[in-house]
Image: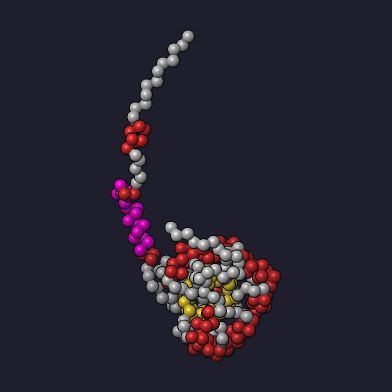
Amino acid sequence: MTTRPRTPAPNTPAPGKLPLTELVEMKRRGQRIAMVTAYDAPSGRLADDAGVDVVLVGDSAAMTVLGHDSTVPATMEEMLILTRATTRGARRPLVVADMPFGSFQVSDAAALENAIRFVKEAGADAVKVEGAGPTLARVRALVGAGIPVMGHIGLTPQSATMLGGFKAQGRTAAGAQALVDAALALEGAGCFSLVLEAVPAPVAARITQALAIPTIGIGAGAECDGQVLVYHDLLGLYDGQAPRFVKQYADLAQEIRRALETYVGEVREGTFPEERHTYSMPEEELQAWQAPPAPVTAVSRR
Ligand code: KIV
């Protein structure tokens, strides 16, 4: 096993870490940004190995990893553990921690306290918050404290009930304009990047042109500056119904099931473990241990 360097102090970019400012340069050069979610050290490391630029420790973890039906139940403590694990695996990509529902809505002070925990305790490079409106003040507070913030508009799963369910946003002229206004406001508040989720492609294209900061699309068409997918959707690891914008690049659930079934079969048949999976001991030690014990000599009684 290779030894990895210790996590540097918060706010000190680790050697080899993609500088945050590089994202806007990528937009200027027309170089697409690849982002994916990850929730632990192995998925973070694999994303890093694959050349991913930004890893999002999404609150989608509530569904993909923790077994909930929505993202709402994710807690700060759970997100901190997952983020801490992910930053141990993902070294070059920027790691963005998703602020879970309830961690930033109450006040600027609470948002700041929780965002600081992501940076100090979990080694996150940035945080993500959903929405505009009241979220704008939170973005200003976090950016003012030196914490980079990624925005998220369109379908914002934490407020899916208010939006009438998990459905595309900005499909009316008024809705589209509201998204453009929200995007400009979030850029003005200091966001370094913006996720556009389930937004018609022409609306996402207009927002992308209007902003200097990069847009990252998920169900928002090909004109965004980058794309994000949920790890478990992309790899075919999630059993639930995938949204139409998901492209599945592998069927790992099928592969894992096949491997587990083979293992169970071999255990039952006794064909696993084989000789090469077991440990031996020096012959003389074995013989000494197996030799019949020396007879116990009778102790004479007086
Ligand atoms: O939580 C998440 O995975 C997200 C992405 C879908 C952008 O917010």
Quadrant assignment for the N terminus:
bottom left
Q: Is residue 260 visible?
A: yes
Magenta stretch: includes residue 11 = no
Q: Position of residue 8 (x, y in %)?
A: 57, 65
Task: Give the magenta range.
Answer: 255-275
Lateral position of residue 251 relative to residue 148, left or right: left
Q: Residue at x 54, y 61 (%)?
A: 6
Q: Position of residue 10 (x, y in %)?
A: 60, 67
- Give the farthest residue toward the top: 302
Q: Quadrant of residue 195?
A: bottom right
Q: Can you say whether 37 is above or below 169 in the image?
A: above
Q: Position of residue 180 (x, y in %)?
A: 57, 87
Query: Could you say which is closer to the camera, residue 256 or residue 84?
Result: 84
Magenta stretch: includes residue 260 = yes
Q: Can you say whether 64 is above or below 185 in the image?
A: above
Query: Could you say which is closer to the camera, residue 277 or residue 69?
Result: 277
Q: Residue at x 57, y 76 (%)?
A: 150
Question: How many numbered marks are there?
Answer: 0
Q: Is residue 242 visible?
A: no
Magenta span dominant secondary structure: helix
Q: Residue at x 35, y 40 (%)?
A: 281
